[in-house]
Image (cartoon, grey):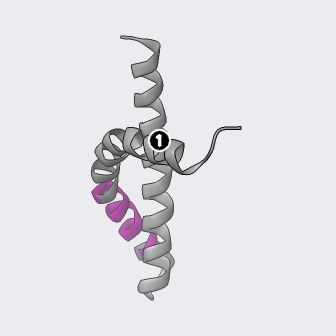
Amino acid sequence: MSYQLKYKLLSSILMSFLMAMVMSGCIMATQYNIGEIIFLSAWRDAFFFAWPIAFPTAFFIQPVVQRLVNKLLPKE
């Protein structure tokens, strides 16, 4: 496996993991008024639902976003 592919996989895994964790936690905290124990289990369930969606999205959308940023941001 090439370094480039390893880099893309690892960055997609980490980015999708952190985004799914933060977003599911924020949504659970702001939308539901539930106790701490229920919150933690609900957050866990929401995270495990979101991460499998976030990973392929991050993996396949990353090149599109990079091309768009390269077009929008002039090179110095």
Judge whether residue 43 is colored magenta: yes
Quadrant of residue 58 within the rendered picture: top left
- The image quadrant where one finds the N terminus is top left
Image coords of residue 55 (percent x, y): 34, 44
The residue at 44%/75% (across/down) is 27
Mark 1 surroundings: few (<14), some (14-19) or many (≥20) residues within 10 A: few
- Residue furthest toward the bottom? 33
Q: Is residue 26 above or below residue 5?
A: below
Amino acid bearing label 1 = Gln
**Image x and y of residue 25, in percent:** 48, 68
Please identify the quadrant where the C terminus is shown: top right
Q: Is residue 25 above or below residue 68?
A: below
Looking at the image, which residue sits at the far right? 76
Q: Residue at x 43, y 47 (%)?
A: 65
Residue highlighted by disc 1: 66
| Residue 39 sits in quarter | bottom left
The boundaries of the magenta stretch are: 39-49
SS for tag 1?
helix
Seen from the viewer's position, the closer of residues 60 and 54 is: 60
Q: What is the chief secondary structure element of the magenta stretch?
A: helix
The residue sitting at 42% across, 38% down in the picture is 12
Residue 31 lies in the magenta-colored region: no
**How many numbered marks are there?**
1
Where residue 68 appears, x then y in whole percent?
45, 48
Percent across and percent down for residue 75 are 65, 38
Q: Residue at x 42, y 66 (%)?
A: 24
Locate residue 62: give its quadrant. top left
In the image, residue 33 sits, relative to residue 51, either above or below, namely below
